[in-house]
């Protein structure tokens, strides 16, 4: 449809031409409001703003956007483009001038690369990045149109108004950066921060919003783009730069199987009666208690289903943490069918079994050293002599036999003996005096 055609078309007709019912469009607006944490009273405003933007877009004032696809499986693009009822991609893409996307643009090859260059030169665009970067082999592990991925991102970020990292690979390196990570895959925020710290970038980094998940949830992408375009701001972010409304509560908080968790009703093995009864999946690896995302609320596929609803435990794909170099959600959550997860200590990612063996080893070593000490001090045979004395002294203070008490008792004995001697000599003197007075009285 040309710009002229859009101009002469009402918004409802525009929706109709795209097979979107008005009711579904309002449902989209309600979903955006809910995802952004806005009150339901905002729905008409969002709908009006969308209408205005789409119709007003005919003036040619669409916000330019670049969608870079780096090291990825294209799952995030697919998830976004294939969503329907209403077709989020259609509505959102009417709001943007998507000047570069390998998967979504009709153009290809050098003409598309030229469009990207011209957009970067003009500046003021939204940069959407899907997939991770690869630093391996001096950046040659990822080359697109004869340009290293690292250079593409550094260049594209230079004049961007904002960056949206779509999907867990973009946020923390994802599957590609899982151990042993031979290609040196890395998430976009960490790469750009490192490049800035190393003095390779002569510009201030634009704001970055992280939208993890494997793949990214299309409603999350739509809500963030709409809020940015219509309200000229990003939603409130967590300290991991994820929208707080979407990534503050755990899956476990809103899980429909939570009641079974509380009742101790678990699936211990797939193919059992417990699985048929849809009991809690914690023993078979569910990472819901540690994973913060609103998946149970937003869901996928016309809000029809999501992982746990389909019988699969949550594997924690939203646990990406762009602030922890060297760790990614795959390393942290694998093995996915085990409820134990690796523990990050400093720069090390340590399996729980290793920690358990370490603690047990330290305990055994401590007991052995303690045993040698006991033997050396003679305590193996009922304790050291002074300990026995002390115990007896405590229980019999009047007849204490400890060294201190013995000295005290000796001093007491000596004092008593002296008192006795003094008393004896007093008596002697007395009797002598009596005798002499008797003799005097006879004269
Ligand atoms: S299935 Fe997972 S998220 Fe749901 S209650 Fe069990 S542990 Fe929590
Ligand atoms: S339920 Fe877990 S694995 Fe599934 S999308 Fe949400 S965070 Fe990812």
Image: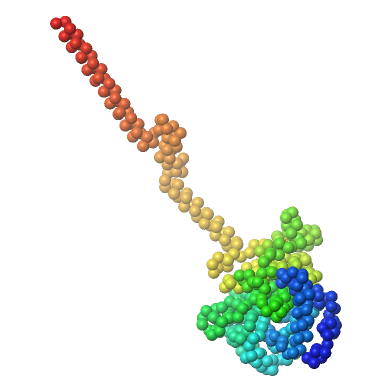
Viewer-closest of 190 and 430: 430
Viewer-closest of 352 and 37: 37
Give the colouring mode of the picture: rainbow
Count of numbered circles on the image: 0
Q: Residue at x 76, y 60 (%)?
A: 257
Residue 213 image position (x, y, % from top left): 69, 73
Residue 441 image position (x, y, % from top left): 17, 7
Residue at the far left in the pictured view: 443
In the figure, is residue 416 to the left or right of 282?
A: left
Q: Residue at x 80, y 92 (%)?
A: 4
Viewer-closest of 132 and 161: 161
The answer to whether residue 340 is visible is yes
In the figure, is residue 239 to the left or right of 16?
A: left
Q: Say if 387 sits above or below 416 in the image.
A: below
Q: Quadrant of the C terminus?
A: top left
Q: Residue at x 72, y 65 (%)?
A: 313
Residue 336 image position (x, y, % from top left): 68, 67
Q: Residue at x 69, y 94 (%)?
A: 111
Viewer-closest of 67 and 405: 67
Q: Quadrant of the N terminus?
A: bottom right
The answer to whether residue 330 is visible is no
In the figure, is residue 360 to the left or right of 122?
A: left
Residue 351 image position (x, y, % from top left): 60, 64
Q: Where's ligand 1: which quadrant?
A: bottom right
């Amino acid at each position: 449809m040309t710009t002229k055609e859009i101009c002469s078309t009402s918004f409802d007709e525009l929706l109709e031409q795209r097979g979107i019912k008005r009711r579904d469009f309002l449902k989209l607006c309600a979903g955006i409001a809910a995802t952004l944490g806005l009150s339901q009273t905002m729905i008409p405003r969002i709908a009006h703003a969308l209408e205005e933007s789409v119709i007003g877009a005919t003036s040619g004032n669409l916000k330019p956007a670049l969608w870079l696809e780096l090291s990825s499986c294209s799952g995030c693009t697919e998830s976004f483009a294939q969503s329907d009822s209403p077709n989020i991609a259609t509505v959102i893409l009417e709001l943007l001038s998507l000047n570069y996307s390998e998967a979504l643009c009709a153009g290809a090859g050098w003409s598309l690369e030229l469009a990207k260059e011209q957009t970067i030169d003009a500046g003021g665009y939204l940069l959407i990045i899907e997939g991770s970067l690869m630093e391996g082999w001096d950046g040659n592990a990822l080359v697109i149109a004869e340009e290293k991925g690292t250079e593409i991102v550094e260049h594209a970020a230079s004049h961007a108004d904002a960056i949206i990292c779509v999907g867990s690979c973009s946020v923390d390196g994802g599957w590609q950066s899982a151990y042993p990570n031979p290609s040196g895959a890395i998430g976009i925020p960490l790469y750009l921060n490192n490049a800035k710290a190393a003095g390779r970038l002569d510009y201030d980094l634009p704001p970055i919003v992280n939208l993890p998940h494997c793949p990214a949830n299309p409603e999350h992408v739509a809500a963030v783009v709409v809020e940015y375009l219509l309200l000229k701001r990003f939603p409130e972010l967590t300290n991991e730069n994820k929208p707080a409304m979407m990534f503050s509560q755990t899956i476990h908080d809103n899980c429909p199987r939570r009641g079974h968790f509380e009742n101790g009703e678990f699936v211990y093995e797939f193919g059992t009666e417990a699985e048929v009864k849809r009991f809690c999946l914690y023993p078979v690896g569910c990472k819901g208690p540690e994973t913060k995302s609103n998946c149970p609320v937003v869901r996928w596929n016309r809000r029809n289903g999501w992982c746990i609803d389909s019988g699969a435990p949550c594997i924690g794909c939203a646990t990406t943490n762009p602030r922890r170099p060297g760790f990614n959600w795959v390393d942290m959550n694998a093995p996915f069918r085990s409820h134990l997860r690796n523990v990050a200590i400093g720069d090390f990612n340590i399996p729980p079994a290793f920690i358990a063996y370490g603690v047990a080893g330290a305990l055994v070593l401590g007991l052995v050293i303690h045993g040698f000490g006991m033997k050396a001090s003679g305590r193996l045979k009922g304790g050291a002599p002074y300990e026995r004395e002390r115990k007896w002294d405590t229980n019999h203070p009047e007849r204490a036999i400890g060294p201190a008490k013995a000295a005290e008792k000796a001093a007491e004995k000596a004092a008593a003996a002296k008192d006795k001697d003094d008393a004896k000599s007093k008596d002697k003197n007395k009797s002598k005096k009596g005798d002499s007075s008797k003799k005097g009285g006879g004269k």
